[in-house]
Image: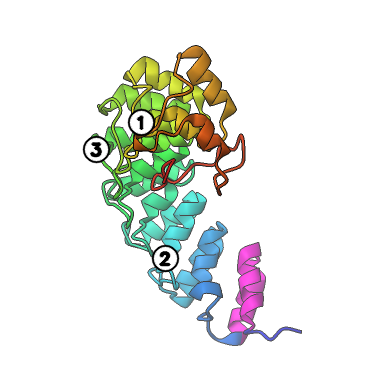
Amino acid sequence: MASPADPRRLYRLVQDGRLCALRGELRAAGHAGCAGPAGDTLLHCAARHGRRDVLAYLVEAWDLDIEAANRDYKRPLHEAASMGHRDCVRYLLDQGAAVDCLKKGDWTPLMMACTRRNLEVIQDLVEQGANPLLKNKDGWNSFHIASREGDPLILQYLLAVCPSAWRTESKIGRTPLHTAAMHGCLEAVEVLLQRCQYEPDCRDRCGLTPFMDAIQCGHTDVARLLLEKHKACVSAEDSLGAQAIHRAAVTGQDEAIRFLVSELGVDVDARAGSTHLTALHFAAKPCTWPARGSTRPVSSSSAPGS
């Protein structure tokens, strides 16, 4: 039989929301300060699993620190926000939790909320003063992160409360439009084109455009939209001279290649810059690119012919 202070049992009780049993165990142990995996406290566990009643009990009966950080500097508010547990988020904010606290990588609770479709949680954090313009170590702000998830309502809300949020680039020069295009978020791309003023064929540090990102990941619906609404250039070249057709070839995007050649009239034998390689060369190269037909994105730091 587990001892009253067995951390594994305590964390299981919190995870399952068994408040009565937890009360008995903690009374017998005389404390609630055990450390769990990755340095989590019981508060981290309660927030992660949405156990608002357990969270309140631990704070009010045992005076656990709502700003306690685990080994990744993640606090209970990060956990609740990332999992979309609105009642836990509201409780922690009401208790005075720092709304823009940073975890490892400089991620705020608002950024964590933006990794999921948590509009109500995002609204609660912003209304309590969360700053959408803060950036993490990679240069992404909350709007940029939300563009990856592609929820148009969240993007519209963030633009309403912070109209300049779209004017952002990552440390490698990627915009929210690049990100939404790469991940095939058609509705998000529509919002970005309607509400923001991105330059046609804006480029990241490797010369990639949003159109290239959409094509190399097989999102032809996004590519069509960029052509129609953003005047994307089909023959734009990245920093090594590769065009969209070369990037589609190297990632095995058959449908995208047919779209480029059959519908847009792209020269299938176009050569990539100084390498003079064609799409066929790229398709035949033995390498570690994603499997044929995969929509797994290629790193923007890797370009065909590198």
Q: Of tags 1 and 3, which is closer to the observer? A: 3
Query: Which label's residue is closer to the chain start, 3 or 2?
Result: 2
Residue 255 in the image, given as x and y percentages of width and height: 57, 24
The residue that mark 1 highlights is 156
User: Disc number at residue 17?
Assistant: none
Q: Is residue 234 above or below residue 80?
A: above
What type is the residue that disc 1 sits on?
Answer: Gln
Residue 53 in the image, given as x and y percentages of width and height: 55, 61
Q: Which residues are magenta?
A: 6-28
Which residue corresponds to the image point at 38% horizontal and 15% vertical from the top-left?
Answer: 228
What type is the residue that disc 3 sits on?
Answer: Arg
Please tell me how crowded label 3 is: few (under 14), some (14-19), or many (20+) other residues with Cα within 10 Å.
Answer: some
Residue 178 in the image, given as x and y percentages of width and height: 37, 36
Query: Which label's residue is closer to the chain start, 1 or 3?
Result: 1
Which residue corresponds to the image point at 34% horizontal and 22% vertical from the top-left?
Answer: 232
Question: Camera-side residue: 88 or 116?
Answer: 116
Looking at the rendered structure, the secondary structure element under dot 2 is loop
Spatial separation of the CA atoms under disc 3 and disc 2: 29 Å
The residue that mark 3 highlights is 167
Magenta stretch: residue 16 in it? yes
What type is the residue that disc 2 sits on?
Answer: Arg
User: What secondary structure characterizes most of the magenta part?
Assistant: helix
Please tell me how crowded label 2 is: few (under 14), some (14-19), or many (20+) other residues with Cα within 10 Å.
Answer: many
Question: Camera-side residue: 258 or 50?
Answer: 258
User: Disc number at residue 75?
Assistant: 2
Residue 26 appears left or right of 206: right
Residue 248 in the image, given as x and y percentages of width and height: 50, 31
Spatial separation of the CA atoms under disc 1 and disc 3: 14 Å
Which residue corresponds to the image point at 72% horizontal and 83% vertical from the top-left?
Answer: 2
